[in-house]
């Protein structure tokens, strides 16, 4: 059986970012949403990045999740090259704990939007869930699975007991 074509493109500026970005991939895996994950740099491999974005868009990708640290231009470059939604995940950094990445991604100029998430693993996981929610707008079965996931979260909170 052939693999389904990816609906989400996950891209990160460095292989070391995978430790964080795998949280986005896990959410997509949990909902059986096909994705492609790549390491491409806005600065070191801009031509390859643009080529991948264009190819992925033409082959049916519906959104991109971009994780980058430091100057964190990756999400912005992708947003400038596609009209598909781009979800930015700031990477934690050594000296500024990811605040530099967050500010770089969130401060996009008017007209080139990037949906920006929290720094690190929580942001990556939420970007994955946000991609699922967007895809669920056109996929009722995926929407049902997302509703079940949310109901399960509510149930676990309501069942929580405080220690004696």
Image (spheres, rainbow, N blue to C red):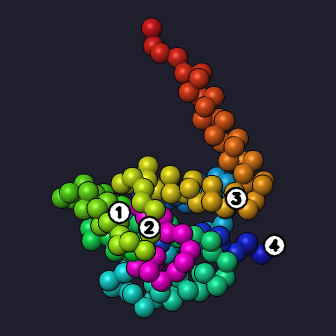
For the N terminus, the quadrant is bottom right
Image disc number at residue 1: 4
For the C terminus, the quadrant is top left
Query: Residue 80 placed where, x, y %?
Result: 44, 80
Secondary structure of the residue carrying numbered label 2 = loop
Image disc number at residue 137: 3
What stretch of residues is rendered in magenta? 77-89
Query: Residue 17 placed where, x, y %?
Result: 39, 65
Query: How much space separates mark 3 and mark 2, taking CA atoms?
Result: 19 Å
For disc 2, the marked residue is 114
Residue at 42% of width from left, 91% of height from top?
A: 47
Query: How much space separates mark 1 and mark 4, taking CA atoms?
Result: 41 Å
Mark nearer the N terminus (4 vs 3): 4
Q: Are marks 2 and 1 in contact (CB under 8 Å)?
A: yes
For disc 1, the marked residue is 106
Secondary structure of the residue carrying numbered label 4 = loop
Q: Is residue 129 left or right of residue 151?
A: left
Please tell me in which quadrant of the rendered image residue 97 appears.
bottom left
Query: Residue 87 placed where, x, y %?
Result: 48, 64
Mark 3, residues whose alpha carbon is within 10 Å: few (<14), some, or many (≥20)? few
The answer to whether any part of residue 63 appears in the image is yes
Secondary structure of the residue carrying numbered label 1 = helix
Mark nearer the N terminus (1 vs 4): 4
């Amino acid at each position: 059986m052939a693999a389904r074509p990816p609906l989400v493109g996950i891209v990160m500026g460095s292989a070391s970012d995978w430790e964080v970005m795998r949280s986005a991939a896990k959410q997509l895996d949990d909902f059986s949403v096909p994705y492609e994950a790549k390491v491409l740099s806005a600065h070191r491999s801009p031509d390859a990045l643009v080529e991948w974005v264009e190819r992925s868009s033409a082959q049916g990708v519906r959104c991109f999740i971009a994780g980058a640290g430091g100057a964190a231009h990756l999400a912005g470059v992708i947003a400038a090259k596609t009209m598909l939604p781009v979800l930015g995940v700031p990477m934690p950094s050594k000296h500024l704990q990811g605040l530099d990445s967050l500010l770089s991604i969130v401060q996009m100029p008017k007209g080139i939007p990037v949906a920006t998430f929290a720094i690190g693993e929580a942001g990556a996981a939420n970007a994955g869930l946000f991609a699922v929610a967007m895809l669920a707008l056109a996929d009722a079965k995926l929407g049902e699975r997302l509703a079940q996931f949310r109901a399960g979260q509510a149930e676990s909170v309501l069942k929580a007991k405080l220690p004696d």
